[in-house]
Structures are given as structure tokens and as C-alpha cells.
Amino acid sequence: MTALAASSEDAHMTTADRIAVRRRRSVSRPLLYGALVLCALLTLLPFLWVISGSLRSLDEIRSDPGAWLPHHLTFDNFERLFRTEGFGRFLVNSIVVAVMVVAGNIVAASAAGYALAKLDFAGRRIAFAAVMGAMMVPLTTVFVTQFVITVDLGLADTLTGIALPSLALPLSVFIMRQYAMSIPDELLEAARIDGAGEFRIFFGIFLPLAGPAVATITIMSFLNAWNNFLWPLIVAQSMSGYTLPVGLAATSQAAAHVTDYGLMLAGAIVVMLPVLVLFLFLQRYFVQGVAGTGMR
């Protein structure tokens, strides 16, 4: 009824009214775009300062900390970061942990979400309630338990021990379950009638259709693993097992009574750059996945 009424009003609009509407739109759009550009610039200013600071020497940062452009461009901070501070090792550790966490969530969380949505088994509602409950439990309440289990498994001071608690995040299970609910049951039943087993249906039909949801949990699980600081700090008991956030914190405390801001800013660039690249490549699928799971 509303659409019909709107179309009826448009039909009775005079030429002068239409011209007035177009003029208002022509004025409002530049204002809207200008406001969006201003907000984007305000958001980017801290990142631009971090980039500028990473390309300046410590003496220059101390002499003019508010400068937006380096007077003498230098990549010495990045060179020292990998040559003397061991950031190459930290970077490899972070990549290995992130790959394990992302792979675990794609396989384990996807399988759990598919089972909760499409398979009828005893205790399905209880299992889903447990997943929802796990999403609401703070990490600090299970931190000690997770550490004791990790030590008992002999995984302390290992990359596997760092990745273990995040291999199947409750949020990833929830996202895959919600997305699986949107896939028609008739499609899966047709595959079963043709003789396909559940594993074939899962890997051959469900996962290809769940591409947006997979992209969503890829980004979320990658962020969880990449930015995690407290758990790797406790589990990694030597510098050889540090990930990037822990390594960056150790670098900032390495020099007694002297904070090397250029070195820290260069480390911050190394930490955040992979996240930005991943999101730029998967942002379209991420939006589709969030919309498809009902997380509005």
C-alpha cells in the first residue's frame, strides 16, 4: 500500500515539483559525500601519522612529534626491526598460528554449524545452547583451565598450544549454523537421493555455497589469532615462540629508560598491514556473509 501511495503521489507531481526535488538532491548529495570524506579523513589521520613516524628517525620524532611528513625519509626502523629485533621469526610464528586457526575454523566450525542446522540428532538443541553459552562466557573465566589443559597435553611453548583454544570459535560455529539455515533442505535431500553421503554433501555442496560465510569466519578467526596478545604471552615461554603482538611489546621494553618510537611504529605497521590486505580482498564476501547470517 505504501509503495502504491508513493507511486500515486509521484504521478500527481508537477514538473516544478520534480525540478525542486532534483535540486534538493543535487544539493544534499555533495554535502553527504563531503561529510563522508571528512569522516574518512579523520579516521585515517592516526594511521597516516603511524606511517609517517615509522619512516622517521627517533631524533626527528622527538624534535617534532607532531609532523605529518618526514623531513628525512628512512627505512632504518624496518631494517632494524627484522635485522636485530627478530621480527622475522615473530612474523612467521603469527602466520603459522593464523593459518592453523583459520583452517580449524573453516573445517571444524563449518562442520559443527552444518550439523546443527541440517542434521537431526539427539541433543541438537542442547548443543546449540552450549555454543550460545560459550559465546557469552568471558575468556578470563576459562583462562586457567585452558592453560592447565595445554600444559597437560605438552603443548606449552609451542605454536600448536597457542592456536589450540581458537581452532573452533563459538562465533564461527554460530555464523555457519545461521548461514546453513538459509540453504534449502530440498537441495541437500536431492543429493542424498542421488546417493551422496554427508561428507560429500558437506565438502561438495555446502562449503561452495557457504563462500560468504567462510569468508566471514576467515576474517574473524584471522583477527582473533593475529591480534591475540594475552594467551600467546602466557603460553610462549621463550622469545622463539612469540607472535607479533607479544614481540612488539617485548621490543618496546627492550631498551631501558628509552622508548624507540620509530621502531615501535614500524612494528605496528607490520602487525596491521596483513589485516588490512586480507580485509580489502574479502570485504565483499564479508558483508554478504554477515547479511546472510542474520547478524544485522
Image (spheres, rainbow, N blue to C red):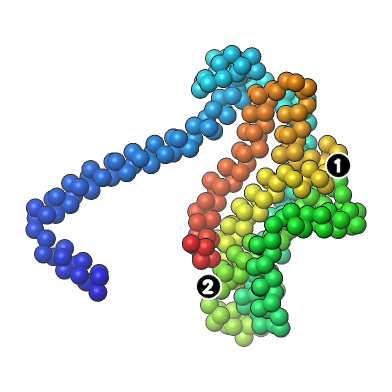
Q: Is residue 181 above or below residue 88?
A: below
Q: Which residue is mark 2?
A: 182
Report the residue at 72% width, 29% height from top.
252
> Is residue 140 visible in this depiction of the protein?
yes
Q: Quadrant of residue 186?
A: bottom right
Which x, y percent locates residue 195? 66, 83
Q: Which residue is the extreme one toward the bottom? A: 193
For residue 237, which numbered disc appears in the image? 1
For residue 200, which numbered disc appears in the image? none
Q: Quadrant of residue 173?
A: bottom right
Report the residue at 89% width, 57% height from top.
153
> Is residue 196 visible in this depiction of the protein?
no
Q: Is residue 124 left or right of residue 86?
A: left
Q: Using a 10 Å C-alpha cutoff, classify the residue at mark 1 as few (fewer than 14 neighbours), some (14 to 19) or many (20 or more).
A: few
Q: Quadrant of the N terminus?
A: bottom left
As rendered, which of 256 and 163 lies closer to the eye? 256
Q: Quadrant of residue 13?
A: bottom left
Mark closest to the chain's N terminus, 1 or 2: 2
Q: Is residue 42 above or below residue 15?
A: above
Q: Is residue 292 left or right of residue 107?
A: left
Mark 1 against mark 2, which lies toward the viewer? Answer: 1
Which x, y percent locates residue 87? 75, 33
